[in-house]
Image (cartoon, grey):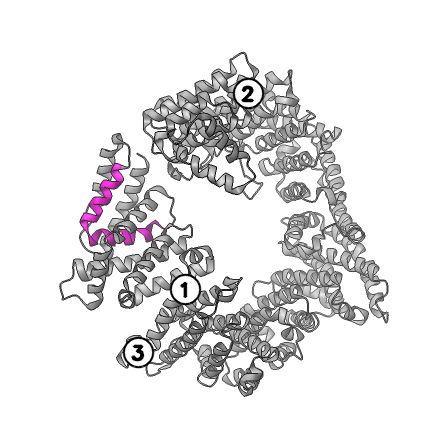
Amino acid sequence: MSSMESLAQLEVLCEKLYNSRDSAERAHAESTLKCFSENSEYISQCQYILDNASTPYALMLASSSLLKQVSDRSLSLQLRLDIRSYVINYLAGRGPNLQNFVIVSLIQLVCRITKFGWFDDDRFRETVKEATDFLGLASQDHYFIGLKILNNLVTEMNQPNPAMPMTLHRKIASSFKDQFLLQIFQISLTSLNQLKSEAPDDFGYIPLDLALKCLSFDFVGSPVDESSEEFGTVQLPASWRPLLQDPSTVQIFFDYYKVNDTRVSKEALECLVRLASVRRSIFVEDPARSQFLSHLMAGTKEILQTGQGLADHDNYHEFCRLLGRFKVNYQLAELLSVEFYGEWIGLVAEFTTRSLLSWQWASNSVYYLLSLWSRLVTSVPYLKGETPSLLDETVPKITEGFITSRINSVQAILADNSLENPLDSVEVLQDQLEFLPYLCRFQYQNSSLYIINIMEPLLQAYTERSRLPAPGDADELSVIEGQIAWMVHIIAAILKIKQTVGVSQESQELIDAELSARVLKLISMTDTGAHAQRYRELSKQRLDRAILIFVQNFRRSYVGDQAMHSSKLYTRLSELLGLNDHLVLLNVIIGKIATNLKCYAECEDVIDQTLSLFLELASGYMTGKLLLKLESVKFFIASHSQENFPFLAEYKCSRSRTTFYYILGSLVFMEDSPVKFRTFMEPLQQVAFNLEATPDAAFWNDVAKRAFIGWMRDLRGIAMATNSRKTYGLLFDWLYPSRMPLLLRAITLWADEPEVTTPLLKFMCEFVLNKAQRLTFDSASPNGILLFREVSKIIVAYGSQILLLPNGTDIYGSKYKGIWISLTVLSRALCGNYVNFGVFELYGDRALADALDISLKMTLSVPLSDILAFRKLSKAYFGYMEVLFNNHIKFVLNLDTNTFVHIVSSLESGLKGLDTGISTQCASAIDSLAAFYFNNITAGDAPPSSAALNLARLIGEFPNLFPQILRTLFEIILFEDAGNQWSLSRPILSLIMTSEQMFSDLKAHILASQAVDQQQLLSQCFDKLMTDVNRNLEPKNRDRFTQNLTTFRVDFRLK
């Protein structure tokens, strides 16, 4: 500790590091003390601190510093063994007297060393034995330190570490599982039994947590989705079978559930959830599986009878998860075979009904209960034998309980503003209604009658309200609308699923018709009388959103391309409402869409959902053709003005215009008629005429600005709808050349207004995209070149002005967004394959050169840190660089030295990022650069071009440029789990080909960084890397190198 005057001074610094509220003081302490975690020479000083320091913060510094040093995986084998042995002895000698956070840190250090050295020396594996020895010591403190070591060891082994390749982690975890996990689980059970009679409230949590971690171990080496509570089947090895067959294993967790400490009881339930999820095949004989199931059911039956612990929300939730697992892992016949099944299923039904009625408290937990019941009822058709399932008696009560609870919730939510309304959340609705349809269809006749009996009085009351001159009591009407909305959602959910197996399809279709008729009747009622004055009311908006979801689900089952054409449903709908086929029904749906678009000008949610339904209908081949026959759709196409659809005039709905015109454009282009297209475009042409006639002074006002923004969004939607050469040609001829000056004028006058430039640039982004080869012009046509010239004018006009603007507070919105869209426009135009760019230089046209120059200036105006920080900007920048290096490398090589080095360095930064797509783009750009060097300089026969001479000069001035990139690529391949190894292999070979000496130096550097005993093996791996690889960049040679690199990576990681 040469930089410290004494240990006391270090302790003061540690106190400041962990406790000071002054950020500058903390930063100073951190800067002073970081040498302990970065320099291996300070390891002995860490030991000195542990031996002599008196404050826990100094001990914490020493422990955490050693942990960081060990995690770097650069320490020698003997040093790691010495640290492990020292810390184990330290915990044995001083552990009981240490603060808990110091103990945890030291234990984490031991476990990290153990994992990282697992295959290096068998002595690392003695940690389990040494932890077990702690359990045999007389001190209770030692006992719990031993349990904590085992607990942390299981966690460490199960959790991937960024410093360790995933393949090595899985290999170590598998070895640990096979050798020690069962033993550790047995220790947890033994500890639970020992502590049960002593002090379970205080200490039972630790062995319970250990048992849970053992049961949660990744037994099959598959990554777990941390965002989900579900984990599938627990794949316990066969060696665990005797433990599971022992009744005391399950019973101990039920015993601990009865403890008053909710943390302990919840942990016990979590263990039971995993035991209930153990794979079926672990039980070789059916009696053993039945006995295990019986024990689980008996334990849950007792909890259902007593209700013990269920007043705690966490316990309640875990208990619902436990019940939900029964049908996931066991067949209905197995449940029926349990002696007390009838009593158990009755208790579960009562519990479910109570939970449904307590919707405010148990809304998230009900999901698992409904999941259990839906799986039970879907199993009934496959049930053999005479034993009654009793589901006929219980399921209708649950269905009715759910519907009743949701109807009653509307009044409660209206009375209490603090409650969230489930009707406002698509995700919550989806969760709540996912399983209900299976219960309803189980006894569909009875369920439908129940739904109709609730629906009819509500519809009657709603109809009566429509006849009143004014809406009357708004709260009462809001309740009615909320209740009807719930019923519509329920009917929509029922229609969403396929018909139930084992039941007549005709009978189910007839019931579908009965339920659908109520909603279709409602559609005609919602926009009449007093209801037509309530479009701003939330309850009315919720009802209309429910109707739209119903229509979407109904359409998928009974209308259009995937529908059943000979359905009995239409026969019944014809009798009830006079709707006898698809076309008549579509007319009703389009009528509702038109009403929503006319009346909900200020509600974005309803507008967006309505357009989503309209888009679905227009996208289907059959439904699209049917739509064109409807007068209401012809009205859409002929009269798409703001007067007819006021939402087009609402600025906050302006983004919806793109979708609206994409739909209308798709319908117009279905007819393949230039005359109809020109007629359709007349309102847009009139807007263009008005804008063109507006003088510059008036062009600045909000009226003109909003008109132009809307016009751009409309055109972008139409451009999106052009999917063929012919339809694109219609739009191109309409725009060019007459409309293009307006775009250039707008971007020149409004360059500093992102709300104008963004829609304009996004339109250009769509217009230049050559999707489905739509930009294919005749061989004699100059249109591709003319289009690029217009693109160049717009980008140059925008870039020239945006570079002069000062950076504001919202630099992304004011500058970066426009820059990344401009780069995307250019990228798409440069690689669209519809322009011969050699023409520009040949005829002295500056369009290409000016576009490239201004784009480069825009990219250089953005700091690299900002490029990497903003995801969309990053994708556009690196995508543009890939196009430049692949298609216009001579432009790059003619740049000044600093700019060239900056760009190439930015590609290296992109390689290191987490985004695989960006990494692939950077690799492609580097491959193009290195391949150019190899083909024109290293292996070039002809006199080098000026571009090649420039590259040779640049690399000569910066000789570390290529070696540094090659080193970065190798580090990614060897030490990271890159998902784009094929793409990364391409530039590696190109760089190796540029200089054999560079590759030899890198090889020596990597070998020197590894342990001495591993160097010979790794040297052989490097020799194999170039086996059968020739000195060229032919495709076959590249593929051979990629195969060798894959083998090299595997061999290197198994060292």
User: What residue does disc 2 label?
Assistant: 144
- Local crowd at mark 3 within 10 Å, few (<14), some, or many (≥20)? some
Does 460 appear in magenta? Answer: no
Residue 355: percent from left, percent from top: 73, 41
Q: Nearer the viewer, mark 1 or mark 2?
A: 1
Which sits in the foreground, 479 or 585?
479
Does 982 appear in magenta? Answer: yes
Q: Is residue 949 visible?
A: yes
**Main secondary structure along the magenta-highlighted residues:** helix
Residues under numbered marks 1 and 3 in contact, where contact means CB atoms less than 8 Å apart: no
User: What residue does disc 3 label?
Assistant: 840
Kind of residue sitting beneath label 1? Ser
**In screen coordinates, is 166 left or right of 140?**
left
The vertical placement of 747 against 827, above or below, is below
Query: Circle 1 — which element?
Result: loop
- Counting residues from the start of the chain, the first of labels 2 and 3 encountered is 2
Which stretch did the figure color magenta?
A: 979-1008
Residue found at x 72% / y 68%: 574
Which sits in the foreground, 99 or 624?
99
Q: Is residue 559 visible?
A: no
Residue 474: percent from left, percent from top: 83, 62
The vertical placement of 539 against 109, above or below, is below
Q: Quadrant of the N terminus?
A: top left
| Separation (CA) of disc 1 from disc 2 | 59 Å
User: What residue does disc 1 label?
Assistant: 861
Q: Quadrant of residue 986?
A: bottom left
